[in-house]
């Protein structure tokens, strides 16, 4: 049954952000046209502290985060809380690297992390690998924003079967595609203000009002503990726990650390960094962005609140199975007045549009600069680059829609976890290269091949008995399945570990060993277009390349 009050409130707020998306092309504009990647893809590289805070926050804390983290807490318990420590340790880790990346990118006019790799190593192949990895890892991430948006639409009663069930989602993404095409990065940057205000409002009300309504946090944790003690009918094991166990503590640690290392390797994260005005802006943001971690911690606890409230996932009429991603929308629907539930749904829905737009722009920039211009049209003008990026952003968005239409959304969640394994393999070529070129470019290629291949092989070995999957059932590998040329060093162990961490370690070992061999053999390391002082240039420096200047390869 359609919830008309909720749908009307949701529709009005969605209309507001649509208008903002279309007028954004003239916001923060210096009069330059959108026919340059600096303007369309990086917002003119002039965003200040507040805009960057909302943009990067809106980019990193997505609708999937708001829907899936509490859903994971609802389904598995304490393990879902890994998202909190990972966002706490993230900012100290990336504080200095993002400053160096901003500086060298502004001096040379780099638009993507693959641009930096191209200049640092003089290798178009290595840049291509980094670009392709970024695009592949980003695609399922965009699809997951659709999963969050669909969860909200489904809860409001738009839960049809077949293509009709996806039509509202398709309409929403057509609108998103059009205003992103017109306004570029300025559209999600402006909309992020609305999204974050709504999210903070909803969560602060929820964590004060709902516990008071349900008997306090003691009753909530008690209900969660009772639920997790019940055995899973498929596996016969407890469904979860409110505390970590001996089997998942290592997984928790490596998943948190691996996720922290991966997050700013995603091209959409670095797009927000490169769009900022200067190093001081980034310093302020690395200090202020952990405020979102407080929000995330409160959000995660709503998974336990949903247990105490007796919320049940809505059955997806397209698949005939319960959709766990609907658990928080269902909680809001049952506990809030209709009008406020509509506000909450708008916060989640708009929270899907902001990162989806930034991700599609970042993927389009990679395609344009590091594949199209590098291999297909070397003489492309800035105008041709911008046009190509706009078209690519449309392809990426509708590719993500097609992904949701034709692939089981539950499998797309598994792919998001796989996405972290994939993007981590670019850490040596991007993050370590900001400090040293000792790792040889061919060793980086070898490390990427081995790390990626081994990581995907280990992911293939992971089953998910609860979902009936024999392979690609998640990212937690039992140590007894860890193989080294047929040898099982941890045979019989039930302890789990994050596959991305294992693959990254192997990648680094191969890169170091092969680098030592190539240096000993005196194999040319390739030319470096950057200089030491490039990594410290700041706003106002004469070394900075003018915004919207003609790119040089």
Image (cartoon, grey):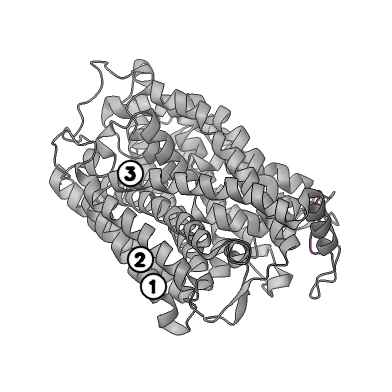
201 shown above or below 181: above
Q: Position of residue 547 (x, y in %)?
A: 21, 31
Mark 1, Cα crowd under 10 Å, few <14 / some 14-19 / many 20+, is some
1 and 2 marks in contact (CB < 8 Å): yes
Of residue 153 and residue 334, the one placed in the foreground of this image is 334
177 lies left or right of 434: left
- Looking at the rendered structure, the secondary structure element under dot 2 is helix
Of residue 438 and residue 94, the one placed in the foreground of this image is 94
Looking at the image, which residue is at 39% across and 28% down? Answer: 49
Q: Position of residue 329 (x, y in %)?
A: 57, 63
The label number, if any, that marks residue 172 in the structure image: 2
Q: Position of residue 296 (x, y in %)?
A: 60, 44
Question: Badge 1 is on which residue?
Answer: 168
Q: CA distance from mark 1 to mark 2?
A: 6 Å
105 shown above or below 357: above
Q: Position of residue 332 (x, y in %)?
A: 59, 61
Q: How many marks?
A: 3
Looking at the image, which residue is at 35% across and 34% down? Answer: 274
Question: Badge 3 is on which residue?
Answer: 190
- Looking at the rendered structure, the secondary structure element under dot 1 is helix
50 shown above or below 154: above
Mark 2, Cα crowd under 10 Å, few <14 / some 14-19 / many 20+, is some
């Amino acid at each position: 049954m359609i919830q008309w009050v909720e749908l009307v409130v949701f529709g009005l707020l969605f209309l507001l952000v649509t208008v903002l998306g279309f007028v954004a092309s003239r916001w923060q504009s210096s009069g330059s046209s959108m026919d340059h990647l600096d303007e369309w893809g990086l917002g003119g590289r002039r965003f200040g502290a507040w805009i960057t805070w909302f943009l990067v926050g809106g980019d990193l804390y997505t609708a999937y985060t708001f829907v899936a983290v509490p859903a994971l807490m609802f389904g598995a318990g304490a393990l879902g809380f890994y998202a909190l420590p990972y966002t706490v340790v993230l900012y100290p880790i990336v504080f200095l690297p993002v400053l160096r990346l901003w500086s060298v990118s502004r001096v040379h006019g780099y638009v993507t992390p693959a641009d930096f790799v191209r200049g640092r190593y003089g290798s178009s192949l290595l840049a291509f690998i980094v670009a392709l990895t970024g695009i592949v890892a980003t695609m399922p991430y965009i699809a997951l924003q659709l999963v969050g948006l669909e969860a909200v639409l489904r809860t409001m009663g738009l839960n049809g079967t077949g293509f009709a069930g996806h039509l509202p989602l398709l309409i929403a993404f057509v609108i998103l595609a059009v205003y992103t095409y017109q306004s570029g990065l300025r559209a999600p940057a402006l909309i992020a203000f609305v999204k974050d205000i709504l999210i903070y409002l909803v969560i602060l009300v929820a964590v004060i009002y709902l516990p008071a309504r349900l008997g306090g946090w003691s009753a909530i944790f008690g209900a969660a503990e009772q639920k997790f003690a019940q055995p899973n009918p498929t596996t016969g094991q407890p469904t979860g726990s409110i505390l970590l166990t001996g089997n998942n503590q290592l997984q928790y640690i490596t998943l948190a650390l691996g996720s922290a290392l991966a997050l700013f390797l995603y091209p959409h994260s670095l797009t927000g960094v490169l769009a900022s005005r200067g190093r001081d802006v980034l310093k302020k943001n690395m200090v202020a962005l952990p405020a979102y971690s407080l929000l995330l911690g409160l959000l995660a606890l709503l998974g336990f609140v949903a247990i105490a409230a007796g919320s049940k996932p809505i059955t997806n009429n397209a698949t005939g199975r319960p959709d766990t991603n609907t658990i928080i929308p269902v909680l809001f629907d049952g506990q809030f007045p209709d009008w406020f539930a509509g506000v909450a749904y708008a916060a989640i829905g708009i929270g899907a549009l902001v990162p989806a737009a930034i991700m599609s722009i970042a993927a389009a920039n990679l395609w344009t600069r590091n594949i199209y211009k590098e291999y297909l049209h070397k003489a492309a003008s800035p105008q041709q680059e911008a046009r190509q990026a706009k078209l690519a952003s449309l392809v990426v968005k509708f590719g993500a829609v097609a992904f949701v239409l034709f692939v089981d959304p539950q499998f797309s969640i598994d792919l998001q976890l796989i996405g972290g394994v994939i993007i981590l393999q670019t850490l040596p070529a991007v993050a370590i290269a900001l400090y040293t070129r000792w790792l040889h470019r061919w060793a980086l290629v070898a490390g990427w091949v081995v790390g990626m291949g081994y990581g995907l092989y280990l992911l293939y070995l992971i089953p998910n008995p609860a979902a009936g999957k024999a392979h690609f059932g998640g990212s937690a590998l039992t140590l007894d399945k860890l193989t080294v040329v047929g040898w099982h060093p941890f045979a019989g162990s039930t302890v789990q570990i994050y596959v991305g961490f294992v693959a990254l370690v192997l990648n680094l070992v191969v890169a170091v060993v092969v680098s030592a061999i190539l240096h000993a053999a005196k194999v040319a390391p390739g030319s470096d277009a950057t200089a030491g002082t490039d990594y410290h240039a700041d706003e106002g420096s004469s070394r900075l390349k003018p915004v919207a200047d003609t790119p040089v390869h």
